[in-house]
């Protein structure tokens, strides 16, 4: 008898799942009012007779701003099962260029947990095309889980937890690191349009290949690893789980390279925020909400991204005889176009973004600013608490050179190392320049030729520096200033 009852429930479940599947297909082609009407009465009718429960997991939540983590996790969990039993699958590129399969729209599949059968289906509402009856509605996907009401507790208490755990593990296994950037131009963001667009991030830099003082390097690596394991600690001290890094130093000293190395070390995604493309503070907040955990938010060259002090605007407002202002007054359309194209992100908006209330949504997040001119930054932006760690990337030391020699020439020692040691200590040369001269320019060039190349460049740079020092001797203050800002 129990087996007959079991079979009956199973067949009822299958019928119900088939019905839901058919309905999801049909409703796309019906006018919006009609399918809402049918659904309303169908639900009422089913609630009298239905012995099954359905749980939906929608793709977008939180006022439709953010893709639901639960949805992505269910998708990952089902992807492992779907490749075995679903008939229509979609494929996406996963880690190491492997294809990851998941069920396609309007597909369904059965799963079993502790001898209980459940049914998953993927449905879609809305469509990108309009019809003669209605306007196009944005597409929204959702998974439905159907099971017999007899197993309510088992499914809600155990099965869903199991799906989440398995799904998360599968996401980690198949995850590919991505480089995201904010995409301007979506005036009316919709369900389909994320505020960010991305590509797969395969930067080869690691901390091993990064040329810098080894003690400083170990300290940074330890700091990062401690951060990534400190969830409980941050909760205990009542602080949002995030950390700010300010990387500063002359161009070509490895700031961007270090960001790539951090992403690799922690297996985080990179969100490269182009501040000048952000329309205003509201858009900035939306961008922040979309950034998931385990990510690095990067704002490069923060000193030239925007006029963050707001002073330029004030100055402009005051100077009525400014040519541009006159032009704008004469031509209101020109002003409008200018307003549209220029960003209205303010310093206070950015500070709120970093450590205001909004910054606490999500966790395990690094915020990295880079600049060539740390002294130009507003102190409010880089005070402790906002930027927790300042890292100076400077000119190439002998230790850093040794790392580059290992990377580029695969050597740990050479008779020329001593000469290079002496010269490099007296010269201000960036790791980028050293790297360039160490790179063989043809297949016939061996390590010695490359090292001689470097010796030559170091000597030239030294002579050049002495010459310019001689010239500028009388204006000592100015020369020091220029040296710190020099561009190689
Ligand atoms: N510390 C370093 N270790 C290893 N390679 C480096 C280092 N610094 C620079 N390089 C090499 O020089 C190139 C330029 O470096 P990178 O883009 O990281 O400099 P940056 O400090 O970000 O410069 P900018 O201030 O102009 O953005 C890199 O592609 C890398 O090959
Ligand atoms: Mg850079």
Image (tube, helix red, strand yellow):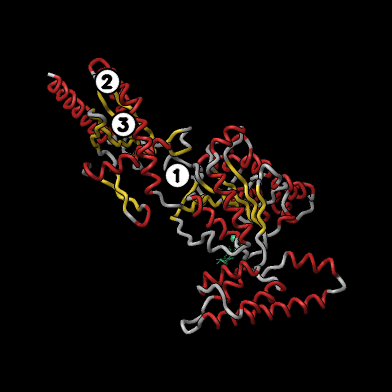
Distance from disc 2 to disc 1, alpha carbons, whole Å, reads: 37 Å
Answer with the quarter of the image where residue 125 lies: top left
Q: What residue is drawn where x is 45% and y is 44%?
A: 193
- Residue 115 x, y percent position in the rendering: 22, 29
- In the image, residue 398 above or below residue 323: below
Distance from disc 1 to disc 3, alpha carbons, whole Å, reads: 23 Å
Q: Earlier in the sequence, mark 2 or mark 1?
A: 2
Q: What residue is drawn where x is 38% and y is 48%?
A: 173
Mark 1 lies on a secondary structure that is: loop
Q: Is residue 91 left or right of residue 138?
A: left
* Closer to viewer: mark 3 or mark 2: 2
- Residue 188 x, y percent position in the rendering: 49, 42
Q: Which residue is mark 1?
A: 193
Q: Which mark is residue 144?
A: 3
Q: What residue is drawn where x is 31% and y is 24%?
A: 154
Q: Residues within 10 Å of mark 1 (few under 14, many from 20)?
A: few
Q: Residue furthest right?
A: 474
Q: Which mark is residue 149?
A: 2
């Amino acid at each position: 008898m129990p087996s007959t009852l079991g079979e009956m429930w199973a067949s009822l479940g299958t019928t119900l799942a088939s019905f839901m599947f058919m309905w999801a297909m049909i409703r796309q082609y019906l006018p919006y009012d009609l399918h809402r009407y049918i659904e309303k009465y169908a639900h009422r009718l089913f609630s009298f007779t239905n012995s099954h429960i359905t749980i939906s997991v929608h793709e977008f939540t939180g006022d439709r701003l953010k893709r639901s983590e639960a949805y992505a996790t269910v998708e990952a969990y089902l992807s492992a099962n779907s490749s075995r039993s679903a008939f229509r699958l979609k494929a996406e590129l996963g880690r190491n260029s492997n294809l990851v399969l998941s069920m396609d729209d309007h597909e369904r599949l059965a799963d079993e947990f502790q001898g209980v059968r459940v049914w998953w289906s993927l449905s879609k509402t809305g469509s990108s095309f309009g019809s003669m009856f209605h306007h196009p509605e944005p597409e929204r996907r959702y998974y439905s889980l159907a099971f017999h009401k007899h197993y309510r507790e088992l499914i809600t208490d155990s099965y869903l937890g199991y799906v989440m755990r398995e799904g998360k593990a599968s996401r980690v296994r198949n995850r590919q690191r991505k480089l995201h950037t904010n995409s301007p131009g979506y005036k009316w963001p919709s369900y389909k349009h994320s505020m960010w667009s991305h590509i797969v991030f395969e930067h080869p830099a690691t901390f091993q290949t990064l040329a810098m003082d080894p003690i400083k390097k170990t300290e940074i690596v330890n700091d990062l690893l401690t951060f990534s394991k400190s969830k409980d600690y941050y909760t205990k001290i009542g602080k949002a789980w995030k950390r700010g890094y300010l990387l500063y130093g002359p161009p070509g000293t490895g700031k961007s390279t270090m960001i790539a190395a951090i992403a690799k070390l922690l297996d985080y995604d990179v969100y490269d925020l182009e501040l000048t493309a952000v329309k205003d503070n509201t858009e900035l907040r939306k961008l922040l909400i979309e950034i998931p955990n385990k990510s690095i938010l990067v704002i490069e060259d923060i000193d030239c991204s925007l006029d963050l002090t707001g002073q330029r605007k004030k100055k402009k407002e005051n100077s009525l005889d400014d040519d541009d202002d006159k032009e704008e007054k004469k031509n209101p359309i020109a002003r409008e176009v200018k307003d549209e194209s220029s960003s209205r992100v303010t310093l206070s908006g950015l500070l709120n973004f970093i450590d205001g209330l909004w910054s606490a949504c999500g966790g395990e997040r690094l915020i990295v600013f880079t600049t060539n001119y740390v002294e130009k930054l507003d102190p409010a932006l880089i005070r402790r608490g906002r930027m927790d760690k300042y890292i100076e990337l400077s000119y190439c030391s002998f230790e850093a050179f040794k790392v580059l020699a290992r990377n580029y020439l695969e050597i740990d020692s050479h008779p020329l190392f001593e000469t290079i040691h002496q010269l490099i200590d007296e010269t201000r040369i960036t790791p980028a320049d050293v790297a360039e001269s160490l790179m063989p320019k043809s297949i016939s060039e061996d390590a010695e030729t490359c090292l001689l190349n470097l010796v030559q460049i170091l000597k030239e740079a030294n002579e050049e520096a002495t010459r310019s020092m001689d010239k500028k001797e009388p204006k000592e203050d100015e020369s020091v200033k220029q040296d710190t800002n020099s561009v190689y």
